[in-house]
Image (cartoon, rainbow, N blue to C red):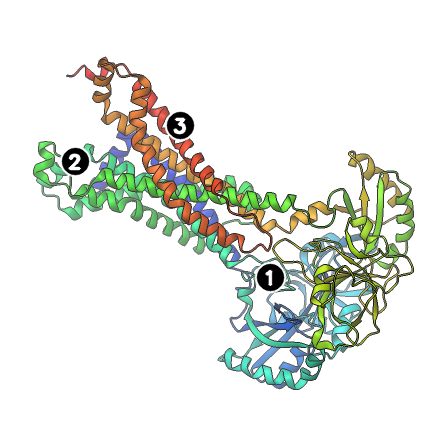
């Protein structure tokens, strides 16, 4: 029986080569997209799955100055004290990312090798008792000793070039000074991906900020360390979390009252961290679960469009199969036998399409990974096999179910007499499926138009500072910073250099410094938490920031501040007259307000402008994390090649041995929208695929329609119908469903894009033309597809079609 079904299926597929090709190509392309997206989403949800389920991060839910937020970090004493006070806590560890403090590059030296490396984390000696890494060599016990490190294998290979690193001494030179460290081990990430990625793990009990974490005893502020706990099996996290608040109040209640803040500690499963957004001070970039659900929806939409093609073409060819069904029924075939026959055909086509998709997927992987910014490589494991089998099963069932039951429902007497109608309107179903296809396609095209409009708005909006023609240079260690002023003086001699300024940070980068400030005569309850850069006196002019009150910094204004309009208003001050007043930093001497600057977007346009200020400290401000290591250079040139060659020459003269490294400020501003650019690229790609598959189906239906109406076309031509008249006749049946699809897609697209735009504090308004353009694009593509086939049919010789009459 199975062999008979199989042979019949092969004969039918071979007999109808055009429709078979359209179905297979559509299913292959749709399956390729679906396989990749499902693999990408599975990869994003795989982070930290190698850890036990009872591993949590302690987040700080805080409220200060009327603003509520969640930090992925906590105060240093919380972890060790929890281990001591709560028996449910089996182990704890803390992680201090130097990136969070603007220390991004570390000079590593070993013998004659010297290189800059990123991602250095201070960790407790218990780190590898909580997190799972594969030790290539060495042991985690080595981290119990001060000034010891564990290296990621890729970093160890670059430094030691084949030598066994364990027991060797390397020198690390960065903002915290120059220090020798003993290599205790080498690890790789073969056990699984983690939201924590570091190239160098330094034991906390060493120098710099690590040593500070060991000694500080603040419970409200200093939320600077990622704190992780492994709970004992059977622990009720909700009950334990409820006991944390009185415990936190006992240790830090007085401090939090002085700071004017409230704080709650909450457990977050480590497996949720990578797919949760909206948490401040994250250890790495996250991918939102909503974004991943959008991707899955796109995957299933594209695959659904391919399945619709199969259903449409199968029902369109039903009249050709009707006599086959009638003969089979006369010979004793039951409805179940026919359903199995036709479902078998769809499963075979789904299998062929999916098998074809696999090599295409591996060929397209570099391109697709470039679009998503990921590193997805589906492996021949059980997960991939399960995804493959599920796609074949679902695609075969969805695409073949209606044709199978539709064909099996034909009545024997009618089909033998040549009446192929059934109780279900096949033409109506086909039109409905075409409407559904183009509803989805227009929905995706609308997404392209709105997202591109928003990204164009982001690129063109006045951010309140000048992002173009600005270069950023970095001075990563004390030796380099000692030569910073000389380099700045030499740059000022270049005619193309308009301004030079040094700062602790620059726009587009996370601001690591913030503190509560309030006017004299008031208390901390009225304080405003403000972020700040420490800069020299040239920052305002160099960055192109506009003042709305007071004046710019002078060299003698050390300790003075320029606040933004938002901060002035939150303090109850008039931005035009606030200059000349004073502010009180918590537990410090009052400082002078020199000027007020117009609000500028120092962060991304996803967020509103927050209270912010520039603090004048050309040589740093003691006690305020004041390492001025970023240099901003304003230039005016159209020949960057010549300018950078000049600057490189000055760099080699002033800083011999230091790698020449720079960035364009405009590039860093753009990087803030990388997730949106990725989404735009994904929707662009898969919307194009969806439209191509839809048009492929329309092409097949148009070809079938022209074939069915062959004699009608011949008669019309003999009676004087023009070619364009026949083209309009044949095209009209397909244009109406596209127009109906547009009518259905528009409100859905408006709702979806409105929700997406809500993630931006500054956004483009939704306009009617965005959706009209999407419908017009889809209509034009459909019209061209159908008209080509209709024109071909209209040009045929009527004698050929009427010869048999």
Report the mark closest to the observer, 3 or 1.
Answer: 3
Between discs 3 and 1, the one toward the N terminus: 1
Q: Position of residue 440 (x, y in %)?
A: 40, 44
Using the image, tell me which numbered label, if any, was put on residue 742: none
Q: Is residue 615 visible?
A: yes
Residue count near mark 1 (Cα–Cα under 10 Å), binned few <14, some 14–19, many ≥20:
some
* Residue 134 location, quadrant: bottom right
Residue ID at (53%, 55%): 758
Cα distance, mark 2 to mark 3? 32 Å
Question: Image check: 280 left or right of 206?
Answer: left
Q: Is residue 349 visible?
A: no
Kindly identify which residue carries mark 1. 195
Cα distance, mark 2 to mark 1? 58 Å
Kindly identify which residue carries mark 3. 784
Q: Position of residue 492 (x, y in %)?
A: 89, 44
Q: Position of residue 389 (x, y in %)?
A: 37, 51
For mark 3, give the secondary structure. helix
Name the one closer to the observer, 396 or 241. 241
Between discs 2 and 3, the one toward the N terminus: 2
Kindly identify which residue carries mark 2. 322
On screen, residue 104 above or below 670: below
């Amino acid at each position: 029986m199975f062999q008979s079904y199989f042979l019949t299926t092969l004969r039918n597929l071979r007999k109808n080569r055009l429709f078979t090709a359209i179905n297979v190509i559509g299913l292959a392309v749709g399956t390729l997209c679906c396989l990749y997206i499902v693999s990408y989403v599975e990869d994003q949800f795989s982070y930290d799955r190698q850890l036990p389920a009872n591993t949590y991060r302690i987040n700080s839910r805080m409220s200060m100055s009327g603003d509520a937020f969640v930090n992925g970090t906590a105060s240093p004493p919380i972890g060790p004290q929890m281990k001591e006070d709560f028996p449910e806590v089996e182990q704890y560890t803390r992680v201090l990312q130097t990136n969070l403090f603007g220390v991004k590059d570390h000079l590593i030296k070993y013998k004659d090798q010297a290189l800059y490396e990123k991602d250095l984390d201070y960790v407790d000696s218990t780190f590898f008792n909580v997190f799972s890494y594969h030790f290539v060599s060495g042991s985690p016990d080595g981290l119990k000793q001060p000034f010891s490190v564990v290296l990621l294998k890729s970093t160890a290979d670059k430094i030691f070039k084949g030598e066994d690193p364990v027991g060797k001494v390397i020198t690390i030179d960065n903002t915290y000074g120059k220090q020798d460290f003993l290599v205790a081990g080498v690890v790789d990430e073969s056990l699984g991906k983690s939201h924590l990625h570091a190239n160098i793990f330094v034991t906390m009990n060493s120098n710099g900020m690590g040593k500070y974490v060991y000694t500080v005893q603040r419970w409200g502020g200093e939320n600077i360390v990622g704190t992780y706990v492994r709970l004992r099996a059977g622990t009720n996290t909700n009950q334990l979390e409820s006991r944390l608040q009185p415990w936190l109040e006992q240790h830090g209640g007085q401090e939090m009252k002085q700071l004017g803040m409230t704080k709650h500690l909450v457990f977050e499963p480590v497996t949720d961290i990578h797919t949760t957004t909206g948490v401040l001070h994250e250890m790495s970039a996250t991918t939102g679960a909503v974004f991943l659900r959008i991707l899955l929806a796109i995957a299933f939409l594209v695959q659904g469009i391919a399945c619709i093609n199969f259903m449409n073409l199968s029902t369109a060819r039903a009249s050709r199969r009707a006599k086959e069904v009638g003969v089979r029924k006369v010979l004793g075939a039951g409805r179940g036998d026919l359903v199995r026959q036709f479902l078998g055909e769809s499963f075979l086509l789904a299998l062929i399409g999916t098998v074809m998709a696999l090599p295409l997927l591996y060929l397209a992987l570099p391109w697709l990974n470039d679009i998503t910014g990921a590193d997805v490589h589906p492996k021949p494991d059980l997960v991939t096999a399960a995804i493959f089998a599920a796609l074949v099963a679902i695609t075969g069932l969805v695409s073949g179910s209606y044709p199978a039951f539709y064909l099996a429902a034909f009545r024997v007497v009618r089909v033998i007499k040549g009446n192929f109608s059934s109780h279900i309107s096949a033409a109506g179903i086909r039109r409905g499926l075409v409407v559904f296809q183009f509803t989805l396609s227009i929905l995706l095209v609308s997404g392209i138009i709105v997202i591109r409009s928003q990204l164009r708005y982001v690129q063109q909006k006045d951010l309140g500072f000048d992002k173009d023609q600005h270069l950023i240079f970095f001075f990563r260690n004390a030796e380099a910073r000692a030569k910073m002023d000389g380099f700045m003086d030499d740059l000022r001699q270049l005619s193309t250099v308009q301004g030079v300024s040094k700062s602790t940070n620059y726009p587009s980068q996370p601001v690591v410094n913030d503190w509560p400030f309030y006017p004299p005569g008031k208390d901390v309850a009225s304080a405003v938490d403000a972020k700040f850069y420490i800069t020299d006196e040239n920052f305002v002019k160099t960055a192109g920031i506009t003042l709305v009150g007071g004046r710019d910094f002078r060299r003698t204004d050390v300790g003075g501040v320029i606040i933004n309009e938002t901060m002035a208003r939150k303090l109850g001050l008039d931005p035009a007259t606030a200059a000349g007043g004073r502010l009180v930093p918590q537990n410090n001497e009052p400082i002078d307000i020199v000027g007020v600057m117009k609000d500028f977007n120092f962060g991304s346009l996803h967020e509103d402008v927050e209270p912010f200020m520039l603090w004048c400290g050309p040589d740093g401000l003691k006690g305020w994390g004041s390492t001025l290591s970023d240099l901003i250079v304003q230039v005016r040139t159209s020949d960057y090649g010549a300018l950078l060659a000049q600057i490189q020459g000055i760099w080699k003269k002033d800083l011999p041995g230091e790698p020449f490294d720079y960035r364009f400020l405009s590039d860093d501003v753009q990087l803030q929208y990388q997730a949106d650019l990725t989404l735009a690229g994904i929707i662009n790609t898969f919307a194009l695929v969806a439209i191509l598959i839809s048009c492929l189906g329309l092409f097949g239906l148009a070809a079938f329609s022209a074939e069915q109406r062959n004699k009608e076309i011949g008669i019309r031509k003999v009676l004087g119908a023009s070619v364009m008249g026949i083209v309009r006749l044949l095209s009209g049946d397909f244009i109406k469903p596209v127009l109906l699809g547009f009518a259905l897609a528009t409100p859905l697209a408006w709702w979806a894009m409105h929700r997406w735009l809500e993630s931006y504090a500054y956004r483009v308004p939704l306009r009617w033309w965005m959706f009209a353009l999407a419908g017009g694009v889809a209509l034009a593509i459909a019209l061209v597809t159908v008209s080509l086939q209709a024109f071909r049919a209209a040009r045929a010789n009527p004698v050929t079609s009427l010869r048999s009459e």
